[in-house]
Image: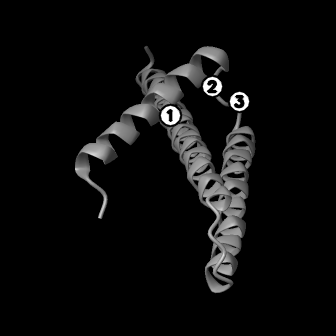
Amino acid sequence: MIDDGLRKSVKSLAGEELQRANYIWPQFNSPHEGYGVLKEECEEASDELRKMNCSLGDVWYNVKTNVRSIEELELIENTAIELALEAIQVSAMAHKFINMYTEQYQYKTEKEKAKDIDIDRRRQGI
């Protein structure tokens, strides 16, 4: 079970990553761009998970053959950190994508309201 304090810390790190990314890169120009960036980050996280699973297989082989080696364990430890970093980037980019949709929805809503007001004024002869 994950501690709530740790979860809050990770959410905070994801927020910091989002701020850093927003400072460097502007908002996504389209859902296609948002998907592409999110997909890339997910693939990078998946790559780290594959590395970790491969190392875990090596650890199991060593256990079965009574070989004591910490090399693979250190690799798992370091890869887990890289996986966590990639997962934080996934979270940040997902939030950036959400922000894009939220901003577009609000813009469209305001635009639609203005259009409706304009139509009403025309009907009233204003």
Snapshot quadrant of residue 12: top left
SS state under label 1: helix
SS state under label 2: loop
Q: Residue at x 31, y 58 (%)?
A: 2
Q: Determine which residue is flagged by label 2.
A: 27
Going from the N terminus, do you reach mark 2 or mark 1 first? 2
Q: Determine which residue is flagged by label 3.
A: 29
Q: Residue at x 25, y 44 (%)?
A: 5
> In this view of the protein, can residue 62 be seen by the observer?
yes
Characterize the local packing of mark 2: few (<14), some (14-19) or many (20 or more) Cα atoms within 10 angstroms: some
Asked whether, in this view, residue 121 is left or right of residue 54, the answer is: left
Q: Nearer the viewer, residue 27 or 114?
A: 27
Name the colour scheme.
one colour
Going from the N terminus, do you reach mark 3 or mark 1 first? 3
What is the CA distance from the residue labelled 3 to the residue labelled 2?
A: 6 Å
Q: What x and y, as percent, mark residue 77?
A: 56, 52
Q: What x and y, as percent, mark residue 41?
A: 68, 45
The kind of residue tagged 1 is: Asn
What is the CA distance from the residue labelled 2 to the residue labelled 1?
A: 8 Å
Does the CB distance between marks 3 and 1 fall below 8 Å?
no
Characterize the local packing of mark 3: few (<14), some (14-19) or many (20 or more) Cα atoms within 10 angstroms: few
Does the CB distance between marks 2 and 1 fall below 8 Å?
yes
Q: Determine which residue is flagged by label 1.
A: 99
Q: Residue at x 43, y 21 (%)?
A: 121
Q: Nearer the viewer, residue 106 or 2?
A: 2
Asked whether, in this view, residue 125 is left or right of residue 39, the answer is: left
Q: Is residue 82 above or below residue 50?
A: above
Q: Is residue 85 above or below residue 44?
A: above
Asked whether, in this view, residue 98 is left or right of residue 57, the answer is: left
> In this view of the protein, can residue 111 be seen by the observer?
no
The kind of residue tagged 3 is: Asn
